[in-house]
Image (cartoon, rainbow, N blue to C red):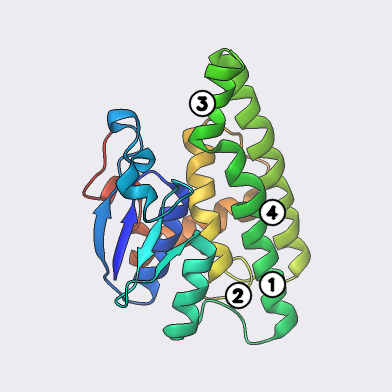
Amino acid sequence: MIFHGYFRSSAAWRCRIAFNLKELRPETVFVHLRRDGGEHKKAAYRALNPQGLVPALQLDDGTILTQSLAIIEWLEETHPTPPLLPSDPARRALVRGFAQAIACEIHPLQNPRIQGYLRNELGQPEEAVAAWLRRWLGEGLAACEALVERSGGGGRFCFDDTPGLADICLVPQVGSAERLGVDTSAMPRLRAIAAACAELPAFSDAAPAKQPDFEP
């Protein structure tokens, strides 16, 4: 397997956590999103992923997988231990819904191409871009806090006493929120879960600052 990613990408970060939990070590190719106008925009990378987004996972037979949730679901199906989803169908749907709330609703609104459009095409100043980020990330994470509370799990992690897909998606999003100045003080469950995850090597080793391509 060859994993194409970038240290700061939340989507690539999710996949790194999943690989670590599954104890898999794919070969990694770094796709710099800022160098030379963005290596993800070049023809060579777009041949792998026409969307020009990271991550992408090239399987041993040459198949190219894109989108972090699809990659993680593939990992779950092909390497089922340890499981990242509950065995109960309704519980699995709750976890998938939480993961999609982050990956499909919150994260896209902070994407660099969205920020670039706000700055360059719409001419918005940095204060307006920052307000946009705080608004949508804060509102989205507040809903995630409510989803976890309503689940009634009460465990150490989002929906169980062991980490899974929901936690894989939560940790990078909390990291982005902190980096972008989003106030999470009213989200004690999410903060506690993120702290519990940080104690696990599978999560801590996947953090952006620990990646070979990390830049301050």
Q: Of label 1 and label 2, which has the lower sequence position?
A: 1
Residue 198, numbered circle: none
Asked whether disc 3 touches disc 4, contact meaning CB atoms under 8 Å apart, the reply is no
The kind of residue on which mark 4 rests is Cys
Residue wearing tag 2: 160
Marks 1 and 4: in contact by CB < 8 Å? no
- Which mark, by number, is residue 116? 3
- Answer few, some or many: residues within 10 Å of disc 2's Cα (few below 14, many 20 plus, some between 14 and 19): some
Q: Which residue is mark 4?
A: 144
Give the alpha-carbon distance from disc 1 to disc 3, as whole Å. Answer: 39 Å
Which residue type does callout 2 highlight? Asp
Left or right of 114? Residue 16 is left
Which residue is denoted by mark 1 in the rendering?
153
- Seen in the picture, residue 2 relative to 127 is either above or below; the reply is below
Q: Position of residue 33 (x, y in %)?
A: 36, 38
Q: Which badge, 3 or 4, is on the more N-terminal residue?
A: 3
- Amino acid tagged 3: Gly
Element marked by disc 4: helix
Question: CB under 8 Å between callouts 1 and 2?
Answer: yes
Q: Is residue 8 left or right of residue 126?
A: left
Q: Position of residue 76 (x, y in %)?
A: 49, 79
User: Residue type at mark 1?
Assistant: Gly
Q: Earlier in the sequence, mark 2 or mark 3?
A: 3
Residue drawn at x 42%, y 54% is 49
Residue drawn at x 32%, y 56% is 4
Quarter holding the N terminus is: bottom left
Given residues 135 and 110, the one toward you in this image is 110
Q: Nearer the viewer, residue 3 or 86?
A: 3
> CA–CA distance between discs 3 and 4?
26 Å
